[in-house]
């Protein structure tokens, strides 16, 4: 699996994350990003073109150095300046109450200790700050959910630790953030087991 994870998976991830089906959801999610922004799970940098014109600088973290071959060239040519760090979301070195917006797209599925990471997101947000998320997760349709449970071990192994069966809204609410809005939908032309999306935001009081 070493060769797969280091050499093949980064290309597959970049290809999947670059799919046009995510363009509008990314743009909608990032449209509200403002102030001091932290992006969690920067990946190969596919959010960069979708930040609104008012955003000129972000901080971003991702632990996977194998993605640098994609992310660093995108950072170098981006309109948005990026202060990038190789870090896990479970242990953020930033001061509490220090970000206006934290962004997370297609990443809560992959963070090993997602509860701890959401606790860190809550900690670093300023009071009144917003958590903007776009995530895939467990479908409310029993038939789809059954397949998600069946396929989860394979997805986890081949998809860089991705889980198909995480429930975004309960996870976010469990962190102490207050849900502001959440929309659920299936992506078109994407298999339902991986295309059940939750898009929304939550606030720190
Ligand atoms: C499916 S990719 C999504 C990448 C990007 N957010 C996007 O929308 O294109 C999931 C990302 O989560 C990152 N990740 C995995 N574990 C993490 C952790 N503990 N903390 C932060 N990011 C993590 C992976 O390295 C990967 O880049």
Image (cartoon, rainbow, N blue to C red):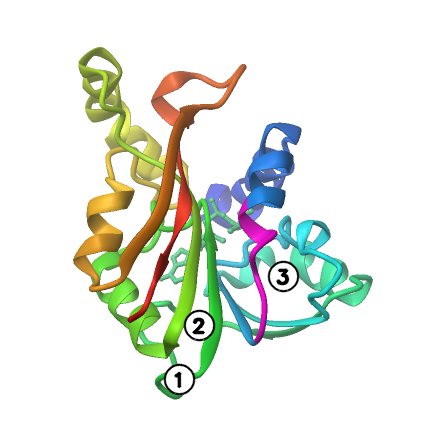
Q: Is residue 36 above or below residue 165?
A: below
Which of the 4 quarters of the picture holds residue 97? bottom left
What secondary structure is the stretch in magenta mostly built from? loop
Indicate left or right for 176 with 71 as reference. left
Q: Nearer the viewer, mark 3 or mark 1?
A: 1
Q: Nearer the viewer, mark 2 or mark 3?
A: 2
Question: Residue 17 appears at what percent x and percent y?
Answer: 58, 39
Q: Secondary structure at mark 3?
A: helix
Q: CA distance from mark 2 to mark 3?
A: 13 Å
Question: Does residue 149 show up?
Answer: yes
Q: Is residue 30 magenta?
A: yes
Q: Secondary structure at mark 1?
A: loop
Q: CA distance from mark 1 to mark 2?
A: 9 Å
Q: Check disc 2: other Cα within 10 Å, few if <14, some if 14-19, many if 20+.
A: some
Q: Which residue is mark 2?
A: 87
Q: Quadrant of ligand 1?
A: bottom left
Residue at image point 66% right, 30% down? 20
Question: Residue 129 appears at what percent x and percent y?
Answer: 42, 70
Total of numbered circles in the picture? 3
The span picked out in magenta is 29-35
| The residue positioned farthest toward the bottom in the image shown | 95
Residue at image point 47% right, 46% down? 5
Instruction: State the residue in front, 72 or 39.
Output: 39
Instruction: State the residue in front, 144 or 88.
Output: 144
Q: Which residue is mark 3?
A: 68
Q: Under 8 Å from ligand 1: the CB of mark 2?
A: yes
Q: Which residue is mark 1?
A: 93
Contact (CB < 8 A) between labels 1 and 2? yes
């Amino acid at each position: 699996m070493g060769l797969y994870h280091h050499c093949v998976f980064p290309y597959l991830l970049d290809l999947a994350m670059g799919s046009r089906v995510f363009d509008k959801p990314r743009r909608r999610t990032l449209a509200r990003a403002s102030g001091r922004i932290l992006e969690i799970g920067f990946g190969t940098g596919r959010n960069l073109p979708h930040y609104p014109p008012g955003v000129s600088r972000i901080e971003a973290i991702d632990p996977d150095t194998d993605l640098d071959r994609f992310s660093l060239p995108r950072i170098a040519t981006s309109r948005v300046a990026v202060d990038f760090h190789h870090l896990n979301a479970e242990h953020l070195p930033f001061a509490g109450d220090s970000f206006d917006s934290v962004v997370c797209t297609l990443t809560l599925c992959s963070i090993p200790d997602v509860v701890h990471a959401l606790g860190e997101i809550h900690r670093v947000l300023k009071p009144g700050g917003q958590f903007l998320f776009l995530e895939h997760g467990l479908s409310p349709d029993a038939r789809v959910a059954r397949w998600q449970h069946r396929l989860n071990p394979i997805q986890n192994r081949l998809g860089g630790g991705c889980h198909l069966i995480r429930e975004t809204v309960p996870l976010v609410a469990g962190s102490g953030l207050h849900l502001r809005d959440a929309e659920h939908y299936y992506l078109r032309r994407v298999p339902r087991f991986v295309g059940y999306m939750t898009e929304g935001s939550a606030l720190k009081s």
